[in-house]
Amino acid sequence: MFGFPPVGNEQPLKCFKEEMVLPPFSEPLTLNSDRRMSKSQNCFGYPLSIFFIVVNEFCERFSYYGMRALLILYFSRFIGWDDNLSTAIYHTFVALCYMTPILGALIADSWLGKFKTIVSLSIVYTIGQVVTAVSSITDLTDFNHDGTPDNLSVHV
């Protein structure tokens, strides 16, 4: 067969190479819902989804490092927890930030898909940031203006 001389009555295989004419490459092709090829949207030569992922990752990193810098101060100075509890909650936050992508991967692979998972969990992350930011406004419950909140349950 391939490179070996024929044995007995065998005829050597002849391979014919057909010429394929492809259109010139201009834009990446994707599958539509009805399985036809169509052109995807581009921006600077990259698929549009790349910019969505990059912006989302930037916002997530900015939020994470901002939260890391302020979380212990928020717990100890604003809410009034002692340093041991503040540090324990802080390290739990950091550990969960590194562990929850496994949960996100399971959700993306088995249930929602990657883009719906990114959007839905980004919304959850944003809600958490907004709740933390709004709850740190002391004027919400500081009716006597002494600098400490009068009703701490609103802030936690």
Image: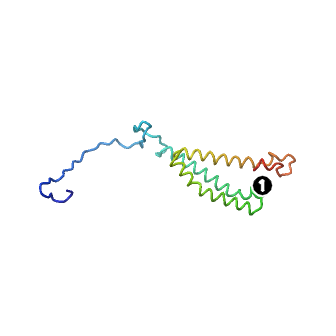
Q: Say few, some or many: other residues with alpha carbon within 10 Å of mark 1 (under 14 / 14 to 19 / 20 or more).
A: some
| Farthest right residue in view | 144
Q: In this view, does 75 lie to the left or right of 52?
A: right
What percent of the width, then of the height, locates residue 127? 66, 46
Q: In this view, does 154 lie to the left or right of 20?
A: right
Question: Viewer-proximal residue, 106 or 14?
Answer: 106
| Farthest left residue in view | 9
Residue 17 in the image: above or below residue 70: above
| Farthest bottom residue in view | 84
Quadrant holding the N terminus: bottom left
Rendered residue at 83%/47% (across/down): 142
Residue 10, quarter of the rendered image: bottom left
Rendered residue at 59%/57% (across/down): 99
Circle count:
1
* Amino acid beneath label 1: Ile
Rendered residue at 45%/40% (across/down): 40
| Farthest top residue in view | 34
> Mark 1 falls on what kind of element?
helix
Judging from the image, the colouring scheme is rainbow
What percent of the width, then of the height, locates residue 138? 79, 49
What percent of the width, then of the height, locates residue 125? 63, 48
Rendered residue at 82%/46% (across/down): 141
What percent of the width, then of the height, locates residue 61? 61, 54
Question: Can you identify the residue that label 1 sits on?
Answer: 79
Q: Is residue 57 left or right of residue 136?
A: left
